[in-house]
C-alpha cells in the first residue's frame, strides 16, 4: 500500500459581512484554522458595496504555504 500526502500550497477564501467588525472576526477565525495547516496570509483585498441601502463588506484573502 502506497501512502502519499499532498500539501496545500495556495488557498483563496471569500468573506462577506454586514459590518467591518463581523468581517474582521470571520477572517481572524479562518486565519487561526489555516495556521493549523501551515498556511499564512499572503494578501488581502477588500471592498465595500451598497445594495438596497445596506452596506456590504467583502474580502478576499489569499493564503500561502508557510513551508
Image (cartoon, rainbow, N blue to C red):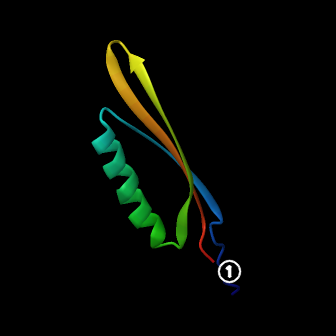
Q: Quadrant of residue 5?
A: bottom right
**On the rendered structure, is 25 left or right of 6?**
left
Name the spot of residue 16 as percent of width and height, x first.
Answer: 40, 37
Name the spot of residue 49 as percent of width and height, x first.
Answer: 44, 23
Question: Would you place residue 25 above or below residue 37 in this image?
Answer: above
**On the rendered structure, is 13 left or right of 21?**
right
Task: Give the residue at x 59% y 56%.
Answer: 11
Question: Would you place residue 46 above or below residue 7 in this image?
Answer: above
Which residue in the protein does label 1 denote? 4
Question: Would you place residue 3 above or below residue 39 in this image?
Answer: below
**What secondary structure is marked by label 1?**
loop
| Residue sitting farthest toward the bottom | 1
What crowding class fits label 1: few (fewer than 14 Cα within 10 Å), some (14-19), or many (20 or more)?
few
Q: Quadrant of the N terminus?
A: bottom right
Question: Would you place residue 43 above or below residue 17 in this image?
Answer: below
Task: Give the residue at x 53% y 66%.
Answer: 40
Q: Quadrant of the C terminus?
A: bottom right
Task: Give the residue at x 64% y 60%.
Answer: 10
Amino acid at each position: 500500500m502506497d501512502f502519499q500526502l499532498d500539501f496545500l500550497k495556495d488557498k483563496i477564501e471569500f468573506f462577506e459581512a454586514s459590518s467591518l467588525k463581523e468581517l474582521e472576526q470571520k477572517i481572524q477565525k479562518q486565519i487561526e484554522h489555516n495556521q493549523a495547516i501551515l498556511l499564512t496570509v499572503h494578501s488581502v483585498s477588500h471592498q465595500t458595496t451598497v445594495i438596497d441601502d445596506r452596506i456590504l463588506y467583502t474580502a478576499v484573502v489569499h493564503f500561502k504555504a508557510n513551508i
